[in-house]
Image: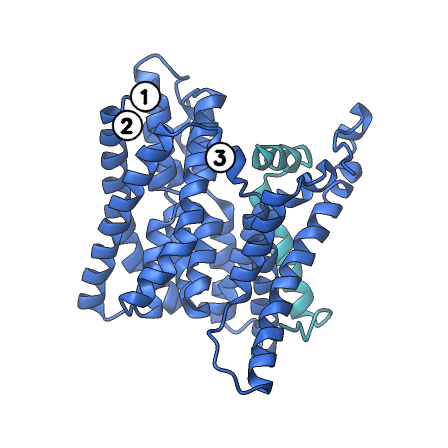
Amino acid sequence: MSEKKLATTATQLGLSLDVWAVLTSFFLALLVRIGLLKHIPW
Amino acid sequence: MATSAALPSQEAHNPFANVVRFIPGVLLLAAIGFAGKLLEQSINGYAKAHHLVIPNIEYVLWAIAIGLLVSNTLTIPKVFLPGIATYEFWLKAGIVLLGARFVVGDVLKLGGISIGLVVLEISGSLILMTFLGRLFKLRPKLTSLLAVGSAVCGVSAIIAAQGAIDADEEDSSFAIAAILALGAIALVTFPLIGHALHLSDNAYGLWSGLAVDNTAEATAAGALFSDAAGKVAVLAKTTRNATIGFVVLGYAIYWASRGQAEKVKNKGAFLWNKFPKFVLGFLVISLLVSVHVFNKEQVGALANLSRWAFLLTFAGVGLRTNFREMSKQGLRPFIVGALGEVLIAGLTLGLVIGANAVWKL
């Protein structure tokens, strides 16, 4: 299952997939907060 | 055309190489998702310019449909597969960032209603699936996996339970295939039923979050109805996801007591390991928005980042749904899953309609 392989790779990088997703989101939120990321179009 | 995704052994230990191999598939997700968005805009623009009245087909459906078309008519080169699997990462990141669209008051109100309904849904699903599994003489551990998958959160719950109850790889593949096939059917049927019953955005979102098993499909089924329904579907589904540790722990203890799985030594650590951390991330972002850490424009930017993450997810839902592969897994688990899902959908619809009558969702 590709999902399992992804989870394994995430763990090989030191953290679970969940934690990577949370950290990435927090990092993006930080970039938005300090003004480096703005006007994200949709 | 196909190229191998297999990594030389030294690359398997190189984190950079591990990350690089995701790029082609992520680009494919982005291309398909963006094509879906362009199609929606182009068709709407054409209809408007020519004064035509045609139903709006959301980018969600286009992205899933293009993904389905690609995965079921072409052989996807292996180089894309690792990146396609990242749809689950984008889904979780999208959910965390979606916290920006909820103030804590909304989370408490809708989340509070969700918790009550989730408890009823999980109890009903576990009982139903166990009964049907026994009726159709499925292997007991396959029945457990189907029950966990349909009660809590689809593929993630099945993978978590497989390790905890020492189930066979084959059983887990059967259960995952059944849950994914039924999720694909829900994408078509749920919005149609929701519109036919004139459900409100909140009621429909709650229903899809409670009844559709896999988080990606629950999110897509909600978004196919409306943007607001998609938001509520994610909240209800996230509430279900938060219970994964308790349900899997229950099954682990049951199978260990029968000598067919390892005993759980530290139950607290077990619960924490199984707890989906993105639920906490979602709550943190929602809390930060509620205390005005972000201004209005920044909240808009976070919400749009969440939409982009979901766009990649929806493309992934289509791309990883391969009906030929699913049909190889056999009919009986699918029949049990389908029967159970129809009953669970009916049960949860009744619960939502009841909750709607009481709380005016």
Chain under disc 1: B
Give the distance between the C-alpha atoms of the residues marked 2 and 3, in whole angstroms.
Answer: 19 Å
Asked if marks 1 and 2 touch (Cβ < 8 Å), the reply is: yes
Give the distance between the C-alpha atoms of the residues marked 1 and 2, in whole angstroms.
Answer: 7 Å
Rendered colour, chain B: blue
Task: Name the residue rendered at 32%, 57% in the picture.
Answer: B207
Q: Identify which residue, B168 or B132, lies in the foreground.
A: B132
Query: Eyeballing the image, is B62 above or below B331?
Result: below
- Left or right, B354 with reference to B301: left
Chain under disc 3: B
**Any mark on residue B133, and which?**
2
**Any mark on residue B326, and which?**
3
- Tell me the SS state at disc 1: helix
Residue B144: percent from the left, percent from the top? 34, 28
Q: Earlier in the sequence, mark 3 or mark 1?
A: 1
Q: Identify which residue, B273 or B50, lies in the foreground.
A: B50
Residue B241 visible in the snapshot: yes
Amino acid at circle 2: Gly
Task: Name the residue rendered at 66%, 68% in the picture.
Answer: A32
Mark 1 = which residue?
A: B140
Q: Which of marks 1 and 2 is nearer the N terminus?
A: 2
